[in-house]
Amino acid sequence: MRKLVAVLLASVTAAACSGSSTSASNTIPLEQVPSELAKSYCAAEQACNPFFYGIAFANTDCVARFTATFEQASFTDIQNAVSAGTVKYDGAKARSCADAISAGACTTLDNNAPTVCQEALAGTVDTGGDCTIDQECKGLARCDTSGGTCPGKCAALASAGVACGSDDDCVKGTVCSPATSHCAAPAADGEPCKGTTAGDCSAGLICVGNDDAKKTPGKCMTASAVLVAKDGESCDLTAGPWCVAGSSCVVQSIAQGMPVSQCQAMAAPGGTCSIGIPSQCPAGQYCPLQLADLAAKMFTASCTDLPKAGEACAPAIALNRCAANLVCDDLTTPLKPVCTEPHALGQTCSGDSLCVSQHCAGGACVPASPCAK
């Protein structure tokens, strides 16, 4: 998914803290801010790339997930800043921001929130002044805590080619490249992607042909250029083409050490399945095959219910490894990973993915800002 969360939290959430009572139709009441923000984000993601949205949220409620993340990552910290007077806000512009994000789809992703989202709040701290969160800084700026001390200092956003720690460090329209840890524009259609040597594709594009283990990049392509094969036609899990909506590119056999795949219809609950993209099994189930099974020329199994809390995670090859709204803890006990509820603030963690806030520091789940109290 795109790293839009920090950008949106820097706008809609703070802006909606006004408690303005002008009209329920053109403002976002405080208690509804996290859910309204999540609705906008999920709507944009679904409209921009329905293929990957269907994979990522096949077993999870997108709105519920991001509502909780927004609440625990930054909402309280922004409320504190509003109370302290370091952030001012505009509830009407918060509503306009949410509407623009929902309607804008791909154009509002990739750290590229609409201008009205930036106008929805006003930080009051000048460049060089003390801060704890980005929203306190005037204009398009960030709270630089890279020195490891708190409070941080308000600083200009990093331009392309400058070192960064996250997308919200970078100027609008650029992201913090996972390959170089420097701000860069996302890869465009036809450009190299992933493989640990290139960046992610722009919103709405699919990276095809990358091999991260071998550090071999793929190429960004549009969904219309990749998702074209129909039931019964050949497909290629690595290089494309992949299958049209309603079909899965599943492994049929192995030839010269490489999988031979074909588009097949989705399986019924408990029905016959094979390893494929997207999963051939319905929501709430997975195909329990592993790579070792393919090597042993076992290509079919039966769709099985996803593991519950406390049970062993589904194999790593499965696109979803746990039942709805659970995460696989493959960090604490990597040899025997189990499914667990995401951890709330203050609970122990061994990595960001285990936290509702998506931030783990010092062995505990924490808010997004390292200076948050």
Image (cartoon, rainbow, N blue to C red):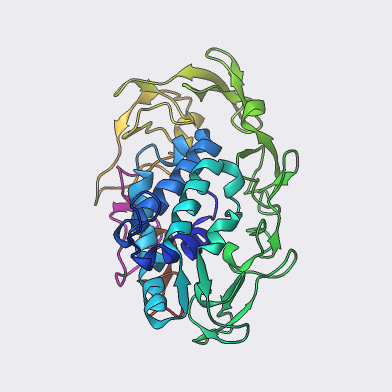
> Is residue 288 highlighted in magenta?
no
- Residue 142: x percent and y percent? 58, 73
Could one spot residue 352 in this view of the protein? yes
Q: Quadrant of residue 283?
A: top left
Could one spot residue 333 in this view of the protein? no
Task: Please tell me how many numbered marks the rendered image carries.
Answer: 0
Q: In the picture shown, does residue 240 fall above or below 328?
A: above
Q: In the picture shown, does residue 24 fall above or below 205?
A: below
The span picked out in magenta is 322-349
Q: In the picture shown, does residue 366 fall above or below 263?
A: below
Nearest the viewer among 313 and 14 is: 14
- Residue 97: x percent and y percent? 50, 53
Q: Quadrant of residue 14?
A: bottom left
Nearest the viewer among 107 and 329 is: 107
Give the quadrant of the C terminus: bottom left
- Residue at 42 percent of width and 58 percent of height: 353
Left-right relation of 225 to 304: right
Nearest the viewer among 16 and 301 is: 16
- Residue at 50 percent of width and 34 percent of height: 50
- Residue at 63 percent of width and 82 percent of height: 127
Left-right relation of 162 to 261: right
- Furthest residue toward top: 232
> Is residue 333 highlighted in magenta?
yes
- Residue 338: x percent and y percent? 31, 52
- Residue at 25 percent of width and 45 percent of height: 308
Majority secondary structure of the magenta segment?
loop
